[in-house]
Image (cartoon, coloured by chain):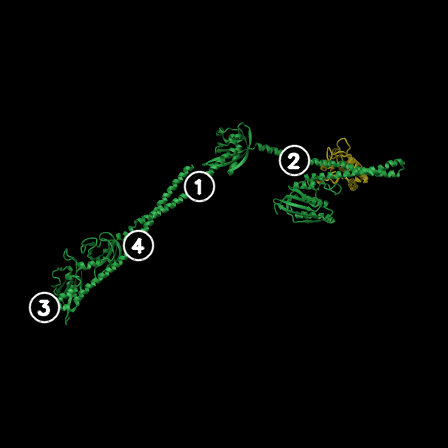
Chain colours: A green, B yellow
């Protein structure tokens, strides 16, 4: 069971671990992806930051270029010398002037910015061409430019155009040539500058200050509903003035976006549909827009090239997490196995203990199911009930009982609190009855109710109890008998004594009477001599001994009587205030004390639990003894003290009297024992016997420590009162 | 010591109930010594005196004309003093009879039992002669003072 549970646990753990690993892998991937995205964003930002100045630079260059071109036109157009020379030349056709005009124009085209320069007259007819061998086609817009220039007197900047299919794109600037007269200005013609877009303008755009594989600058403008690409794009051939994208196509195309008025940075798709980063701007004073763009692929290429880093990072994090989990798992599994080992070990030990217990138990241990069928019985059950091990399976609890109804009731009552015990009479296999004490416990085993019964064979105990009760009874009877014998004996013993004493007294009276008669009467001398010793010595001596003997006998009997009476007296224990009791007692002794020069010291005494009257008698006897057996050579000092010792109180009565010789220490408690020789100190020899009897009847103890000639210390131990 | 009844003085008879002959003799001697000259009757146990008082049996019988006083020993064979006392005090006629318990023990329990049953005086028989004599002398004094009523009815 344990193994399968273990396997189950292991399976669950593996599932857990793999789930955790997957989760960690996800987290790691997400983290790496996030990192990658951040890198991309950073790269984009950096690329954009490079594109923006480039756009600005290009705008600046275009602007300067256009201004240069404008200046060229302006210098020729407004310069009075050239216009006047041209006006004169128109009429004269002077060769010198022709050359001067040519020189002027060549000077203007010193940088070969123009593919051609043409001069028109006011009627818009061509009159001079700088490079007659070169074609200078007049495009759609050119005539309008010329007309506008003549009409407004302003320099007209044309657009990039391609007039003839296959020819390079061109841009024409038309500048009016004005001659001032007294009566006003006169337009004498128009100067047409054919700008070399291909060689002098486009390279401006194409020049890229950075090493790049995809970046380019586009020049676009709106042409009707389209975006017209004015220059050749990098990634397609012959696009200048031929590539168009409808404005409706996609605003994500930067060229479209800028033409629609949204200049600035943008990420979108270029004319190829390739993702690009772009920045756009407007060329002042023209319909032109420029777009600086770079393929996103190029921007992110360096980051993508770092893929092993990301994969490594992700894998690393996952592996790290995995190994951490693994480590934890192994640590936990180690702990678990250790716990399992401990549990298993303890279980095994408990099992051994249990089996040993079952085997060696002094009581029968039975296990029954709810219906009372016996499921298990130990060896002791066999010996108690006399069944063989094979019998138990067929037995039910009621088969063991003698009164099954009563037994069932007892069992229900005992198991009210789940466990309890009761006494009953069971039946052995052979039918003999068996007094038992049953301890039952209701236990749940695998969801089923079982009753465990521990059955103790009380045959022996019952016998012992019976014998004990019998002995106690006998003892009590004997004690009572003894008391009554003692009482009756002492009672009856006194009766003859009354006679002995009474009649001896009468005898004495009679003898005295006789002696008187004897003295008065005349009696022969010989008779008188014979009677005199009888009358004067023998009879009085005999009477004296009879009387003293009977007096002694009376004392002894009275002693026995008192002792027996003490035995019969009821003990009424209560909490005794010993300070008060001893104080009252010492007061009654004060006269005797004073007379004998004795001092008594009483320390504060703990209270005890005893019969106060008997205690007064006890301490009175002890004090009496101290007085009786004082050392006449010194003043008597009695000290009464006490202390609590656990649940008891020990009082001490110490004196500096004659003490008790070692060989008498045990005899002093005996009845009629007297320390001093008879007659020396008056006493019944009963005081300490009574003391011991009192202490015993009050559940205490009395003992003595003494040194002959130095004094005695009597100790009285009694139950302490619960309070104090 | 007389009892006045019907204007006539009759001497009070002393009933000595004592199983011990010696004691009985000592009591009588001592009473006589103390000057008590009343008639005295001696009974050897409780049954005898009870028969006398209840006028049963074959012995002497109580006279309804006379006044009596009883000295009663406690410990006696056949019927002890305590039982006699109990019977006497339980009897509506006899309960006026003065009873003096005279015994060897000074056991407080027994003394109390006697007084509870209604004995009039309790005297311990002391062994010492002087004490005994003194006790009986006092008893004699009492007996000279006590006016014992005549016990009239049948009794028993």
SS state under label 2: helix
Disc with the residue nearer the chain's start (3 vs 1): 3
Q: Which residue is mark 2?
A: A476
Q: Which residue is mark 1?
A: A338
Judged by depth in the image, the label closer to the viewer, 2 or 3, is 3
Q: Disc 3 to disc 1, how far (Cα)? A: 122 Å
Mark 1 burial class by Cα count in 10 Å: few <14, some 14-19, many 20+: few
Quick check: do tags 2 and 3 share a chain? yes
Pointer 3 with pointer 1, Cβ within 8 A: no
Judged by depth in the image, the label closer to the viewer, 3 or 1, is 1
Q: Disc 1 to disc 4, how far (Cα)? A: 53 Å
Give left or right: position of B152 versus A296. right
Disc with the residue nearer the chain's start (1 vs 4): 4
Q: Which residue is mark 3?
A: A92
Task: Name the residue furthest top.
Answer: A430
Residue A482 in sight here: yes
Q: Which residue is mark 4?
A: A42
Pointer 1 with pointer 4, Cβ within 8 A: no
Q: Disc 4 to disc 3, how far (Cα)? A: 70 Å
Of residues A269 and A485, the one drawn nearer to the viewer in this rendering: A269
Q: Quadrant of residue A546?
A: top right
Pointer 2 with pointer 4, Cβ within 8 A: no
Judged by depth in the image, the label closer to the viewer, 1 or 4, is 1
User: Residue under mark 3: which chain is it in?
Assistant: A
Judged by depth in the image, the label closer to the viewer, 2 or 4, is 4
Q: Disc 2 to disc 4, how far (Cα)? A: 112 Å
Residue A577 in sight here: no
Picture disc at residue A190: none
């Amino acid at each position: 069971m344990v193994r399968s549970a273990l396997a189950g646990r292991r399976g669950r753990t593996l599932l857990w671990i793999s789930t955790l690993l997957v989760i960690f892998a996800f987290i790691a991937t997400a983290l790496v992806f996030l990192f990658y995205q951040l890198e991309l964003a950073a790269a984009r930002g950096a690329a954009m930051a490079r594109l923006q100045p480039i756009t600005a630079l290009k705008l600046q260059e275009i602007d300067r270029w256009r201004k240069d071109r404008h200046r060229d036109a302006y210098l020729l157009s407004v310069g009075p010398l050239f216009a006047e020379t041209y006006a004169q030349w128109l009429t004269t056709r002077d060769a010198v002037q022709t050359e001067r005009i040519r020189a002027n124009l060549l000077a203007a085209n010193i940088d070969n910015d123009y593919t051609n320069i043409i001069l028109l007259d006011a009627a818009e007819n061509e009159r001079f061409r700088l490079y007659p061998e070169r074609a200078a086609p007049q495009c759609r817009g050119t005539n309008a430019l010329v007309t506008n220039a003549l009409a407004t007197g302003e320099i007209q900047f044309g657009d990039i155009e391609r007039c003839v299919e296959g020819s390079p794109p061109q841009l024409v600037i038309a500048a009016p040539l004005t001659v001032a007269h007294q009566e006003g200005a006169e337009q004498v013609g128009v100067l047409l500058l054919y700008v070399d877009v291909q060689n002098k303008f486009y390279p401006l755009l194409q020049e890229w200050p950075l090493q790049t594989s995809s970046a380019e600058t586009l020049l676009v403008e709106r042409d009707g509903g389209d975006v017209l690409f004015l220059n050749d794009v990098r990634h397609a051939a012959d696009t200048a003035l031929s590539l168009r994208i409808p404005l409706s196509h996609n605003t994500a195309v930067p060229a479209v976006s800028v033409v629609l008025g949204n200049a600035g940075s943008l990420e979108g798709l270029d004319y190829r549909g390739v993702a690009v980063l772009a920045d756009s701007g407007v060329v002042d004073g023209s319909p032109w827009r420029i777009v600086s763009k770079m393929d996103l692929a190029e921007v992110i290429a360096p980051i993508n090239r770092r893929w092993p880093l990301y994969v490594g990072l992700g894998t690393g994090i996952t592996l790290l997490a995995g190994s951490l989990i693994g480590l934890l798992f192994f640590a936990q599994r180690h702990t678990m196995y250790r716990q399992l080992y401990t549990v298993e070990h303890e279980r095994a030990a408990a099992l051994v203990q249990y089996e040993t217990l079952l085997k060696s138990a002094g009581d029968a241990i039975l296990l029954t199911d709810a219906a009372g069928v016996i499921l298990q019985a130990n060896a002791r059950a066999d010996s108690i009930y006399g069944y063989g091990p094979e019998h138990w399976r067929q037995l039910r609890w009621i088969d063991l009982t003698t009164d099954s109804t009563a037994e069932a009731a007892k069992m229900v009552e005992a198991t009210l609190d789940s466990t309890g015990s009761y006494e009953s009479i069971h039946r052995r296999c052979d039918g003999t009855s068996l007094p038992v004490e049953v301890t039952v416990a209701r236990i749940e085993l695998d969801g089923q109710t079982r009753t465990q019964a521990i059955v103790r064979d009380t045959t022996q105990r019952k016998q012992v109890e019976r014998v004990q009760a019998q002995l106690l009874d006998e003892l009590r009877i004997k004690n009572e008998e003894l008391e009554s014998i003692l009482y009756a004996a002492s009672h009856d013993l006194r009766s003859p004594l009354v006679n002995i004493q009474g009649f001896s007294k009468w005898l004495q009276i009679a003898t005295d009477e006789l002696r008187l008669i004897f003295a008065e009467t005349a009696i022969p001398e010989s008779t008188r001599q014979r009677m005199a010793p009888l009358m004067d010595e023998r009879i009085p001596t005999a009477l004296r001994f009879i009387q003293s003997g009977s007096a002694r006998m009376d004392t002894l009997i009275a002693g026995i009587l008192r002792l027996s009476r003490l035995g019969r007296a009821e003990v009424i224990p209560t909490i005794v205030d010993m300070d008060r009791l001893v104080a009252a007692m010492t007061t009654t002794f004060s006269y005797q004390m004073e007379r004998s020069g004795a001092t008594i010291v009483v320390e504060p005494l703990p209270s005890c639990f005893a019969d106060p009257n008997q205690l007064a008698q006890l301490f009175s006897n002890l004090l009496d003894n101290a007085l009786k057996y004082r050392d006449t050579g010194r003043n008597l000092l009695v000290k009464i003290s006490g202390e609590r010792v656990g649940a008891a109180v020990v009082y001490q009565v110490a004196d500096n009297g004659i003490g008790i010789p070692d060989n008498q220490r045990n005899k002093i408690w005996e009845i009629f024992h007297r320390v001093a020789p008879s007659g020396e100190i008056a006493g019944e020899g009963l005081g300490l016997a009574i003391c011991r009897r009192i202490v015993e009847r009050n559940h205490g103890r009395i003992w003595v420590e003494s040194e002959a000639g130095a004094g005695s210390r009597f100790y009285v131990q009694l139950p302490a009162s619960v309070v104090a | 010591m007389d009892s006045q009844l019907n204007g006539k003085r009759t001497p009070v008879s002393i009933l000595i109930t004592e199983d011990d002959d010696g004691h009985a003799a000592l009591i009588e001697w001592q009473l006589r010594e103390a000057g008590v000259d009343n008639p005295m009757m001696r009974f050897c146990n409780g049954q005898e005196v009870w028969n006398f008082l209840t006028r049963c049996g074959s012995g002497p019988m109580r006279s309804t004309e006379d006044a009596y006083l009883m000295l009663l020993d406690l410990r006696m064979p056949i019927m002890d003093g305590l039982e006699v006392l109990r019977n006497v005090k339980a009897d509506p006629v006899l309960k006026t009879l003065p009873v003096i318990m005279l015994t060897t023990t000074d056991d407080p329990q027994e003394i109390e039992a006697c007084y509870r049953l209604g004995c009039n005086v309790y005297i311990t028989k002391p062994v010492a002669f002087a004490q005994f004599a003194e006790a009986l002398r006092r008893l004699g004094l009492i007996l000279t003072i006590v006016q014992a009523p005549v016990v009239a009815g049948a009794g028993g």
